[in-house]
Image (spheres, rainbow, N blue to C red):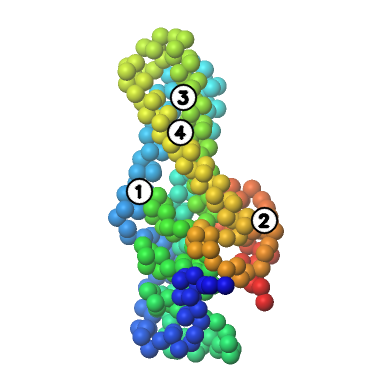
Amino acid sequence: MKSSPANRGRDIERQAGYLCPEHCMPPPPQTHSAGDMWFIRDGCGIVCGVITWLLVLFAEFVVIFVMLLPSKSMLYSLVNGALFNGLAFLALASHFKAMCTDPGAVPKGNATKEFIESLQLKPGQVVYKCPKCCSIKPDRAHHCSVCKRCIKKMDHHCPWVNNCVGESNQKYFVLFTMYIALISLHALIMVAVNFVLCFEEDWAKCSSFSPPTTLILLILLCFESLLFLIFTAVMFGTQVHSICNDETGIEQLKKEERRWAKRSKWMNMKVVFGHPFSVSWLSPFAPPDHGKANLYQYVV
């Protein structure tokens, strides 16, 4: 069977002669601890991240000041206000965690002669070297040109969270898409209810804003919510499908040969969200505890 160019490139990396450790400078000294915040200084990603927060805050403004506060039913306002604000808070917290969590970056510049010798490789054992960041690359790791690092189990680089989605932050990215989809759906329902009530009554009494302003704000919120609902629902479904099949987006795109053992879909979910199943799966403040879930199982 004829191998693809991508596979041929990885075959070259299998040969020790091509590692060329003498071409790699020693890795830079560690100037930060493991607890330091991860942040990518990419202009496009920063702008997209700020836009995401501004859009959520705009939705908050319209929901609270245009629809809930002028409502005659206090119970309706309290229930929907608590639900919407709770989901919005979880969405922004998930976004922050996805953006500021190390996605699984491989130490940069560790493909030195000393480090390779310290691995005590057995005869015929395969190692990979990334020619871009000069690192010994683990299996299922790929180089990101934006982060300028190799990322373990990299799925894709998302400008909306200004980060790669990888082994260590995929849970937060999935939660972000889920909570954005939920608040978008909730906002659409509230807009529909508000339109019905305002058509039945006088528009001037429906909101503290003028009728034209109220109508424009509701239409903008409806358009934003519909757009984000479709986008994030599709992304959420794609992510869950990839997790269940234990295959990242890049691996699907490149049609890479599967060299890792097949697990059940439920075990694959535990690998990303934590073991065992608990309510912490839904929390962006709970790092996934893998427990008995083996991150890497390879076919011998």
Q: Label 4: which residue?
A: 226
Secondary element type, mark 2 = helix
Q: Earlier in the sequence, mark 3 or mark 4?
A: 3
Q: Amino acid at mark 3?
A: Val
Q: How would you rate the neighbour count of disc 1 (Cα within 10 Å): few for under 14, some for 14-19, many for 20 or more? A: some
Q: Residue furthest front?
A: 1
For mark 2, what is the residue? 265
Choose the circle earlier in sequence order: 3 or 2. Answer: 3
Q: Residue furthest left?
A: 43
| Circles 3 and 2: CB atoms closer than 8 Å | no
Residue 139 screen position, x and y as percent: 54, 72
> Which residue matches tag 3?
191
Image quarter where the N terminus lies is bottom right
Residue in view at x 42 percent, y 29 percent: 222
Residue 246's image quarter? bottom right
- Looking at the picture, which amino acid does disc 1 mark? Cys
Which of 125/116 is in front? 125
Disc 1: which residue:
48
Residue 300 image position (x, y, % from top left): 67, 77
**Please, is residue 56 above or below residue 105 in the view?**
above
Asked whether, in this view, residue 27 is left or right of residue 272, the answer is left
Q: Earlier in the sequence, mark 1 or mark 4?
A: 1
Task: Indicate the secondary structure of the residue bearing disc 1.
Answer: helix
| Residue 85 in sight | no
Q: CA distance from mark 1 to mark 4?
A: 19 Å
Taking the spot 36% from the left edge, 12% from the top edge, the residue there is 204
